[in-house]
Image (spheres, coloured by chain):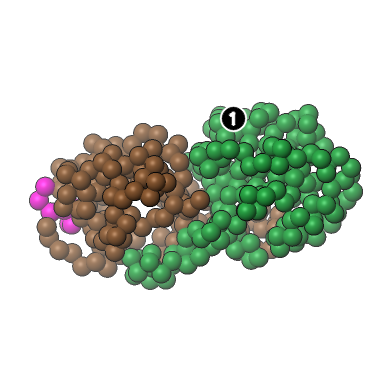
Chain colours: A green, B brown
Amino acid sequence: MKRIPFFAIMGAIAAGVGGAMTVAAAGAGYENTLIFGGKIPPGYRDWRLISVAHEEGALNDIRAVFGNDLAIKAYRDGKRPFPDGAIIARLAWSYVPSEEYDKAFGRRQSFVAGPPTNVQFMVKNAREYASTGGWGFAQFDDGKPTHVAAPGCFSCHVPAKARDFVFTRYSP
Amino acid sequence: MKRIPFFAIMGAIAAGVGGAMTVAAAGAGYENTLIFGGKIPPGYRDWRLISVAHEEGALNDIRAVFGNDLAIKAYRDGKRPFPDGAIIARLAWSYVPSEEYDKAFGRRQSFVAGPPTNVQFMVKNAREYASTGGWGFAQFDDGKPTHVAAPGCFSCHVPAKARDFVFTRYSP
């Protein structure tokens, strides 16, 4: 696998230059590994919520992380590594102030979700994605795959190795 | 119904002096209207997500809004008013910076959900809650009801009358 500087990848992801980055970063064998056949897993928006977060900076989004049944069960049971078939979805929306909420609260303090920006998935298959911690990665912008099985995604998740490469903690 | 200044109520809610406020604000007939019998609706944490938000100031939280099946269906069908039985849950967590995420992104920009602060519910029953727009309201702190059927909750929702008193919009 070709090595790519960590922050170069992060910058590319943050800037949303997904298509070009994927091609540049994809080592042999990656080009044709279209996770989920290049399609968004159906029904992910109905999955249960794992947690929420806000990213400032170039991302400037508010985000929700969902898990399919296998992922939620592993979270609640505290089981790691996640079982094959577990899928985690991160859906982000643009971060916008809400005048309407501010009025109700009597001061400027409210931020809500605007239009969606992109959605990312991690799917667990220990054998198929052995070279990236057992996880396949994918990102979709406007429904189109922009990062698929990208090793750059995995690089960013390495610091969470002790938690099976998943950053997000379950919020009760 | 006794009238209470709007911002006095908002301040009381924001400051979290729920128990005292409820007693002070409750007009005749409210004291004994314990929504859900004073219990948290079981399983609400598994409901589907409507949207997310962040409140600065005294609240300083990040929040998720969930709907039971009736509420989600009404949202997706664009149906207003919501049908009897629809329940909307707003779960908030303290808003905390994440050093771990910041490291992954290469700059200070990340905020995640800390411990839960409280959870609020709106339940629709046009007849039972006719005097508050057809909605009963409840808040639970640490699993204990602190606001129940409080008219103060309703006052804050009046500006959203055109959307059946519900502020939160569905985030696709």
Relative horizontal placement of residue A25, taking residue A56 as reference (left or right): right
- Residue B21 shown in magenta: yes
Q: Compared with residue A100, is residue A62 higher up or lower down, i.e. above or below? A: above
Single out the residue that lies furthest toward the left: B28
Which amino acid lies under the numbered mark 1 shown in the image of this protein? Leu
**How far from the left and from the top, in percent, is residue A92?**
58, 54
Q: Compared with residue B40, is residue A9 higher up or lower down, i.e. above or below? A: below
Which of the 4 image quadrants contains residue A154? Answer: top right
**How far from the left and from the top, in percent, is residue B89?**
37, 46
Q: In the structure shown, which secondary structural element does the residue marked by tag 1 occupy?
A: helix
- Residue B94 shown in magenta: no
Relative horizontal placement of residue A146, taking residue B161 as reference (left or right): right
Badge count: 1
Mark 1 crowdedness (10 Å alpha carbons): few <14, some 14-19, many ≥20: some
In the image, A46 versus B8, the foreground residue is A46
Q: Chain of mark 1?
A: A
**How far from the left and from the top, in percent, is residue B112?**
56, 53
Q: Residue at x 12, y 60 (%)?
A: B2
| Residue linked to disc 1 | A70
Relative horizontal placement of residue B97, taking residue B54 as reference (left or right): right
Q: State the extent of the magenta-drawn residues as a range.
A: B20-29
